[in-house]
Image (cartoon, rainbow, N blue to C red):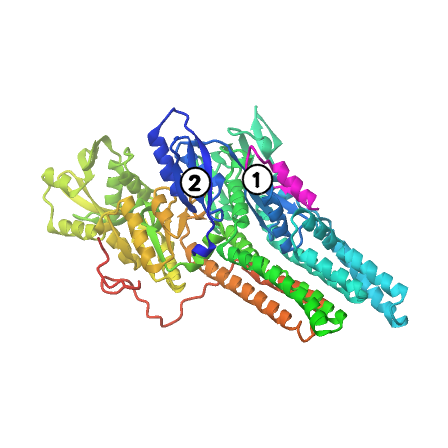
Amino acid sequence: MSDAATVRKTLVVPVLVVNGDCRQCLRRLEESVSALRGVFSALLQPDGRNLAVTYDPALSSIEAIRTQAHESGVALTKKFGHVNLGITGMDCADCSITVEKAISRIPGIVDVSINFPTASLVAEFEADRAAPQDIISQIEGMGYGTISSERREEEGAPFWKRQPRSILTAISGLFVAAGYISSLFLAGDNALHIALFAMALLSGGYPSFRAAFYSLRRTLTFDMNVLMTVAVLGAVAIGAWEEAAVVAFLFSLGSTLESLTLERTRGAIRALMGLSPKEATVLRNGSSFPLPVEEVKVGDIILVKPGERVPLDGQVLEGTSTVNQAPITGESAPVEKGTGDQIFAGCINQRGSLKVLTTHAYKDTTLAKVIHLVEEAQAQRAPSQRLVDRFSRYYTPSVIALAGLIALVPPVLFSQPLQPWVYRALALLLTACPCSLVISTPVSIVSAIGAAARRGILIKGGAHLEEAGNLRAIAFDKTGTLTMGRLEVTDIQPLNGQSPEEVLALAAGVEAHSEHPLAQAVLREARHQGVKPVPAQDFQSLPGMGAQARTNGRVSMMGSLRLFEERGFQLPDRARKAVSSLQNEGKTAILVGSGDEVVGILAMADVVRDSARHAVDGLRRQGLKKVVMLSGDNDATASAIARGLGIDYRAELLPQQKVEEIKSLRARYGAVAMVGDGVNDAPAMSASSVGIAMGSVGVDVALETADIALMSDDLEQLPYLVALGRRTRSTIFQNISFSLLIKLTVISLVFPGWLTLWLAVAADMGSSLLVTLNGMRLLSGNGGQRPAAEGTGQTAHSETACHDEGCGDHHHED
């Protein structure tokens, strides 16, 4: 992000250390908060009781800082409060700026952000100087209503009830039509003609007149409502009743159509809220009964029948079923759920009844956290929005000043007739408000974030979405990210006339009573192949070497090459070569023996995800210059995985070395993403331009700390994410360019006298509507991915061929 788009706020927050003066705790607090995205510094004051935090409100918040401090084991006192509200009756983008300015003037307000497309407000304040009610009173004092975030889902009333202006617009249109019809039968400006247009003007203009009054009274701001009111009253003053009525009607019609269009965007949050049932079937004392989800306690047992949505997060106690997790993770394939498995609110139970032990209250479910985070993300200003806001602060006063000069200079200095130049000045005033510019960025950001959320991608703000569109390089953690994060049997090589099934059965028999990860991999493979383990007794673990047991009256073993050498086994050259070959592939080779002979070799590895290769190819099609794996594993294992995926790698890295690698990539490529689990990779993710955590469903820490969270383990979401970011940036550029072009064109029509009042308002409202519709195309969820062009020359990555820019070296670099 450029410095021009960066805002810095510094707050001093009191620290509460429960266990006395813990210097180590306080140092950890500084480090933890400083690592938070958007925080420039976090320094303890000399008294050791206050933390001075400098941060960017678009990337972080007091609430996020408090959560991060809590994760580090230190509490921050509640000196600051946080509120999230919906605003009703706000039907123009410029109104949101006026309301935001009025709220920012309340004593004790630290930061406030209003997102017009979602009609939502997020504010942070000093708890001892301001309160949510102060904010609500200010909003209601300006003629708007408020609704808490918890009640957004209740906004199910018809559009005309939520937007009374639609009725007034219709009435205004009828009076305008009647006025034109009357002019066909009665010539001149007769009383009926004027009365009809006056009624059209009052009915269509009333919401704007009221908003203009509050705007001037509360903030002395010349927003679009004030400018429109001045233009209409000016038209009446010079006797242009017809044009005044048409301007009021067109402005009201444009605002109504814009609100109607944005209803689809605002409905995205309501749709998420609607995923959670209002009631749960609770089992208590041998009976079942429905209960509102708000009243269900943690530890209650609920019954989820086939076809029902899961009401609360919990753990399956009894039953098996397939569950559609698409509402949370975006996964299209149903997931098998049985005893002990986690299950999440909003998911759909498909075929079997499940008894579920609730583990989270209604407000603490994964779905509730996703909704909250999406609301917060949509309310944040993106960097491009800040630049537009800066431009608007200069544009509007400049146009108003120009309108004043046009109205006064020709009549006063050049003895021109007053009325034509006043008319031109009034027309120019209607172009002074940059409505389409103001809405061009937020409507695109909100639409894209909503589309991503439906696919199980949680983007924590417009700044991160824009960065995703800027990416030139991406780094992956290995274990659990590119790989499954658990060992699997990959090869079975029988020796001495044994079959693969016999080798697997013997190995499974020896390991049947072991909890070692290698043993669990063997047992999983046996179950997968339907192989029954050989009966075994006298199991004995051999730490660091393997295990043994008695099977069919003989001692059977499985373990490392060293174990068999120390036990005196005569190993054929074929076995030694096979072990060496498997190890060179980054696999763990385990020998299986019975009696005094080796019967086979098992190879195990942390298997690469099926989606990894497609994801790497998709990222390259999106134009990324560098795809690299950062691993703490040994060189042989990392090399094998990187070679299979066709990517570069760095191996045997400590966490701090991963951070240095990310910094090096950023110095070379600019915008770099780090993909990991959001917990162990937090330092490297923090050092990157965008930290992406995958498999975040149910992982609270990942949801809180990542810039972008993939709720599933599907790596193929990454090319979509990059494409969506780039399409969003392109859409914002289109919207801003179009808005500026329309403004310049309309202003140029003033001087020759070609700009009429109705044309000015039609151009302003029409451009706002077109910009809104263009931004909302992102709601379709199509990231704009294209298949790879034929003949691109992309080949498998080898030690002599590399797709990554500048990758002519050996894969491993110290």
Which of the two residues, 658 or 136, is positioned nearer the viewer here?
Answer: 136
The front one of 77 and 704 is 77
Is residue 578 in sight in this rendering? yes
* In magenta stretch: residue 128: yes
- Circles 2, 1 touching at the beta carbon (< 8 Å): no
Q: Nearer the viewer, residue 631 or 380?
A: 380
Residue 135, quarter of the rendered image: top right
Helix, strand or loop under label 1: strand
Q: Which residues are magenta?
A: 124-148
In the image, residue 686 sits, relative to residue 384, either above or below, namely above
Q: Give left or right: position of 342 versus 483.
A: right
Q: Quadrant of residue 262?
A: bottom right
Mark 1 belongs to which amino acid?
Answer: Val
Measure the alpha-carbon separation of dots 2 and 1: 20 Å
Q: Mark 1 = which residue? A: 83
Nearer to us of marks 2 and 1 is 2
Q: Judge left or right: residue 747 versus residue 252.
A: left
Res. 53 mark: 2
Residue 29 at what x, y percent from top left?
38, 35
* Position in image of residue 171 (x %, y %): 80, 58
Query: In the visual, does 245 lie left or right of 404?
Result: right
Whether residue 127 is situated above or below residue 483 in the rendered picture: above
Percent coordinates x, y for residue 794 in the rendering: 33, 67
Q: Residue at x 9, y 44 (%)?
A: 570
Say whether residue 434 is visible: no
First in sequence, mark 2 or 1: give its number.
Answer: 2
Q: Is residue 700 above or below residue 176?
A: above
